[in-house]
């Protein structure tokens, strides 16, 4: 059967019923009754904490735990050299999945200040854990540290973080995790064809999630059975049921899959569903090991500084060379990144017609903390939009026109994409033009745009406009083995069943609404059952990466249509019944005698005859009687997209045709360097809108997060000691809604994605895209480039040569 979700017909009355969407979690959260992982308490609960290193880089030479062990209330002390933990290891950052590197669960060498390492204490309370850790007598061997990745990747650099095992084939001594160089097209030829070569360097400092719920995991063994309450989305079974064999000794699985039960309470500060990615699997493994030693008592492991110890993957140095023509066409570019990602070959390659692209990068170990995506895409959006701005400025062009001039997919221009759309059943639409036009009208771009540094306001400040654009993600459709939610209807209520954490983004409401619309049930007759694992037989795709809505709802459309077919078949089948002895089944008349399923339909939770709508019965009346004989359960597996063509030839590529565009207006005080954002417009083409309020919330919150990154957030380390200076929300400032004006949030629906009805995700998009937006606005205001992020007042004054 052909699997082309973007061609599916949207249910009738779909838009009309959207205003009635209400959040399932609203009462619990507003009333303060919602239970998060940190709130979990079980009878006999023990508490566990890990030693946080006081040094940026140091080895434990010796450790005396005798005083800690003698402290009343201490139940266990686990040292890094103990056989239970010595060789245990796991994912040190999410990219280890792709074969990057592996870290010890409880290392004996600290890799950064406050690194959880060395020893873990289990006690009757958090306070006793803290006291016990202070009683440890440790002899340290301080080691040289590196805070700048440009220093780390040098061949002559001092070796750091020696216990981390770099496993990528392109790792390089002494500290490089991976170095790679990828080219599309002929970059040198592209430079030769350019009217102008533009070169510059961007520097981005490090920031972190700084969330309000730090990491926690509760584990309890019941004989050979394991229960886990986790602050994480990915199923912890994955971390526990496979042996680890990257070290000198293979560590057997900690538990068998069928004997693990996971509960996912409400999640705070999850930022994409993987929790604090830099150490998450090791943290879960450590909690399980400590609980195994506790002989049946539950253990809650916490790490209070976790949200400050996982750092952004967009930090780094971007050395850029751009070739462009006078009309704004970019003929070639080369970005060399000293950082975590090869930015050039990701989103800019996917969403431009630029024919010649080279991306190279070097990722080196630094004694700051693990780096991972908190809002994926920022590492691409930053250099992408600086490039558009620099080309526009070089030739005196409007940056929105330069963006349109270079729009396309994988080197193909938009005329080519339009032919592809027509050939494969997509609407013929130009997403970037649509979102730019909406945004320009909302902010008044055509009336307000001016040459850089030319508009001084009556208050003495300089006025500026800023603009960014990039593709929308995620654009793919789910494939087999990716998402397996189940629908179960009983007592007239359909339950969406699947393991998933609730991180607050409310994709659940969109899922309930599409199930209600496809089945004909009322929205209030749907419910999401999640967080409790049945060993992952049913699994709702994790919230990270903006996959959630597109992946979950595509499979739910199939499940809901299958359920509706089943309900209509119930209505015309003889009904099962029990005789008075309750032992033998008999058959009763159908709910709708002499009718066929196609004669009936479902609306407002009633099954009715199309030709005679007054002939109706509730879904519950029809379906309940079949539960024992043929329960109303559906669990379809999605298909696999195939048969895509271009010009009649097979083309399996999934082209990214949806776009987003965001605009800001600023006032820059040239005496203080302060940048005031006075107007924000966000436009996202999400293909198809499942949940209006949820999408707007992602735009609004994303704008605040993105602008916070662009103007405020950066971590600081002492250059002499390597100690982090801002491990709390007092010293590490983040932007809030009080720092920025309200956003105008606009949605575009082009139906150009590959998921159900052409849907895209939205979750990470706005925050990532806007994380570098101030460079264009400040340049338009003062006529000076600020290539160091964030654009803080001191950097503005430095650009103005006032300091």
Image: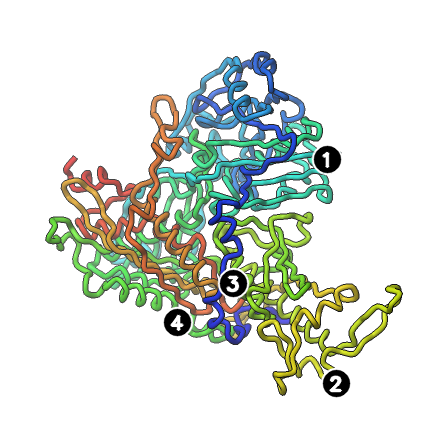
Placement of the C terminus among the 4 image quadrants:
top left
- Proximity of marks 2 and 1: CB atoms separated by less than 8 Å: no
Residue plotted at (59% across, 54% down): 540
Quarter where residue 551 is shown? bottom right
Q: How far across and how far down the image is residue 317, in percent? A: 35, 40
Q: Earlier in the sequence, mark 2 or mark 3?
A: 2
Q: Residues within 10 Å of mark 1 (few under 14, many from 20)?
A: few
Please name the residue that numbered disc 3 is placed on: 653
Q: Secondary structure at mark 3?
A: loop
x and y percentages locating residue 47 in the rendered image: 58, 28
Between discs 4 and 2, the one toward the N terminus: 4
For discs 4 and 2, the disc positioned in front in the rendered view: 2
Find the distance from the CA under tag 4 to the CA under tag 1: 63 Å
Q: In the image, 675: left or right of 554?
A: left
Number of marks in the image?
Answer: 4
* In front of the other: 438 or 776: 438
Q: Are marks 1 and 3 in contact (CB under 8 Å)?
A: no
Q: Earlier in the sequence, mark 4 or mark 1?
A: 1
Q: Nearer the viewer, mark 4 or mark 1?
A: 1
What is the spatial separation of the Cα atoms under label 4 and label 2, in whole angstroms?
Answer: 55 Å
Numbered label attached to residue 222 = 1
Residue lying at 65% horizontally and 66% vertically, measured from the top left: 492
Tag 2 secondary structure: loop
* Image position, residue 512 (x, y; %): 56, 62
Q: Residue at x 45, y 21 (%)?
A: 54
Q: Residues within 10 Å of mark 2 (few under 14, many from 20)?
A: few
Task: Return the residue found at the far bottom.
Answer: 611
Image: 558 above or below 284: below
């Amino acid at each position: 059967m052909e699997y082309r979700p973007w061609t599916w017909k949207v249910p009738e009355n779909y838009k009309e019923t959207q205003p009635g969407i209400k959040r399932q979690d609203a009462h619990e959260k507003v009333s303060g009754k919602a239970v998060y992982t940190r709130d979990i308490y079980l009878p006999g609960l023990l508490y566990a904490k890990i030693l946080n290193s006081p040094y940026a880089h140091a080895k434990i030479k010796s450790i005396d735990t005798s005083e800690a062990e003698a402290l009343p209330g201490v139940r266990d002390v686990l040292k890094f050299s103990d056989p239970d933990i010595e060789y245990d290891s796991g994912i040190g950052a999410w990219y280890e999945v792709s074969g990057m590197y592996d870290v010890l669960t409880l290392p004996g060498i600290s890799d950064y200040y406050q690194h959880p390492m060395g020893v873990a204490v289990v006690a009757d309370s958090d306070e006793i854990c803290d006291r016990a850790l202070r009683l440890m007598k440790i002899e340290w061997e301080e080691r040289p540290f590196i805070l700048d990745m440009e220093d780390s990747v040098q061949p002559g650099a001092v070796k750091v973080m020696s216990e981390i095992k770099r496993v990528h084939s392109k790792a390089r001594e002494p500290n490089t995790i991976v170095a790679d160089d990828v080219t599309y097209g002929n970059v040198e030829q592209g430079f030769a064809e350019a009217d102008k070569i533009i070169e510059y360097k961007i520097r981005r400092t490090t920031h972190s999630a700084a969330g309000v719920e730090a990491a926690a995991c509760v584990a309890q063994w019941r004989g050979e059975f394991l229960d886990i309450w986790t602050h994480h989305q990915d199923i912890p079974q994955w971390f526990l049921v496979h042996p680890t064999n990257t070290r000198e000794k293979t560590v057997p699985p900690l538990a068998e899959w069928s004997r693990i039960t996971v509960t996912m309470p409400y999640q705070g500060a999850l930022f994409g569903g993987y929790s604090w990615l830099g150490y998450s699997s090791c943290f879960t493994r450590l909690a399980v090991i400590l609980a195994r030693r506790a002989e049946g008592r539950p253990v809650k492991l916490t790490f209070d500084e976790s949200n400050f110890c996982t750092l952004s993957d967009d930090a780094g140095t971007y050395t850029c060379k751009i070739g462009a023509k006078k009309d704004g066409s970019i003929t070639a570019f080369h970005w060399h990144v000293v950082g975590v990602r090869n930015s050039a070959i990701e989103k800019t390659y996917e969403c431009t017609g630029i024919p010649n692209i080279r991306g190279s990068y070097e990722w080196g170990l630094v004694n700051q903390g693990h780096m991972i995506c908190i809002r994926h895409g920022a590492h691409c959006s930053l250099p992408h939009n600086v490039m558009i701005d620099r080309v526009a400025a070089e030739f005196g062009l409007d940056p929105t026109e330069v963006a349109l001039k270079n729009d396309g997919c994988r080197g193909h221009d938009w005329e080519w994409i339009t032919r592809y759309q027509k050939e494969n059943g997509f609407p013929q639409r130009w997403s970037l033009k649509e979102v730019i036009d909406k945004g320009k009208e909302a902010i008044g771009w055509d009336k307000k745009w001016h040459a850089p540094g030319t508009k001084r306001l009556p208050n003495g400040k300089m006025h500026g406009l800023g603009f960014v654009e990039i593709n929308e993600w995620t654009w793919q459709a789910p494939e087999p083995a990716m998402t397996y939610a189940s629908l179960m209807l009983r007592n007239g209520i359909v339950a969406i069943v699947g393991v998933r954490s609730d991180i607050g983004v409310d994709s659940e409401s969109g899922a309930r609404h599409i199930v209600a619309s496809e089945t004909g049930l009322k929205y209030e007759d749907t419910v999401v059952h999640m967080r409790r694992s049945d060993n992952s037989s049913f699994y709702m795709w994790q919230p990270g990466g903006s996959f959630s809505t597109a992946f979950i709802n595509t499979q739910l459309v199939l499940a809901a249509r299958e359920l509706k077919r089943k309900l209509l078949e119930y209505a015309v089948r003889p009904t099962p019944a029990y005789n008075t002895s309750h032992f033998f089944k008999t058959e009763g008349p159908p709910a709708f005698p002499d009718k066929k399923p196609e004669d009936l339909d479902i609306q407002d939770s009633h099954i009715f005859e199309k030709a005679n709508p007054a002939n109706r019965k509730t879904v519950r009346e029809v379906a309940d009687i079949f539960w024992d004989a043929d329960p109303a359960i559906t669990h379809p597996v999605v298909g696999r997209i195939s048969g895509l063509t271009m010009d009649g030839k097979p083309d399996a590529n999934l082209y990214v045709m949806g776009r987003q565009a965001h605009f800001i207006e600023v006032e820059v005080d040239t005496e203080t360097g302060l940048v005031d954002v006075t107007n924000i417009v966000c436009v996202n083409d999400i293909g198809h809108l499942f949940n209006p309020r949820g999408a707007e919330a992602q735009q609004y919150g994303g704008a605040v997060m993105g602008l916070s990154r662009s103007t405020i957030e950066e971590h600081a380390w002492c250059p002499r000691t390597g100690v982090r200076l801002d491990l709390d929300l007092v010293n590490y400032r983040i932007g809030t809604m009080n720092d920025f004006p309200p956003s105008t949030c606009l949605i575009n629906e082009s139906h150009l994605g590959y998921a159900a009805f052409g849907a895209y995700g939205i979750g990470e998009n706005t925050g990532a895209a806007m994380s570098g937006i101030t460079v264009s606005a400040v340049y338009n205001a003062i006529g000076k480039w600020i290539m160091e992020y964030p654009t803080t007042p001191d950097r503005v004054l430095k650009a103005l040569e006032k300091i």
